[in-house]
Amino acid sequence: MVLELVTFHIIPGHEREFLDHARQHAKNSTGEYEGCHSMQFGADADRPGYVHGVVVWASREAHTRFKTTDERIDWRGRIEPLLQSEPELRFIHEVEHYAAGTAV
């Protein structure tokens, strides 16, 4: 399992619009693409204008395949005008997820 951690720096006043696009994207994408287990997006509580995303992938390769899909390309086109800069992207490998004391 791989976690994708992404930070978006949003143009002031466009945070709600960005979150609406991000959450719709997550609803449309999670489970629709092989290897995408979940997506979460939320506003930074301490830094206005920043939104963070956490995506759980089966592998880094699954993320790479997803980047070429029409859904992802369309979404990126919709959010691009709302960004102050390129998103900051990090991947965390060898992740174990624990819920209620059980490895998932």
Image (spheres, grey):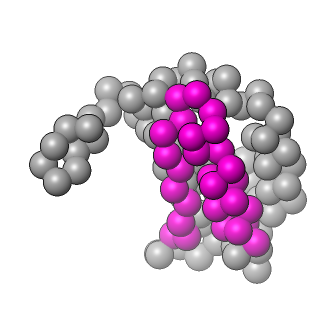
Residue 46, how many percent across, how many down? 47, 75
| Quadrant position of residue 62 | top right
As rendered, which of 82 and 85 lies closer to the eye? 82
Outermost residue on the front side: it is: 32
Q: Is residue 100 above or below residue 56?
A: below
Q: Is residue 16 above or below residue 73?
A: below
Residue 30, how many percent across, how many down? 58, 45
Residue at 12% x, 49% y is: 101
Residue at 51% x, 56% y is: 40
Q: Is residue 4 visible?
A: no
As rendered, which of 72 and 102 lies closer to the eye? 102
Residue 54, how many percent across, how many down? 49, 49
| Quadrant position of residue 23 | bottom right
As rendered, which of 88 and 25 lies closer to the eye? 25
Q: Which residues are magenta?
A: 17-44
Residue 89, how many percent across, how many down? 58, 41
Residue at 39% x, 29% y is: 1
Q: In the shown orientation, is residue 96 left or right of residue 56?
A: left
Q: Is residue 95 visible?
A: yes
Outermost residue on the left side: it is: 101
Residue 41 highlighted magenta (yes or no):
yes
Outermost residue on the top side: it is: 61
Residue 80 highlighted magenta (yes or no):
no
Q: In the shown orientation, is residue 56 left or right of residue 18?
A: left
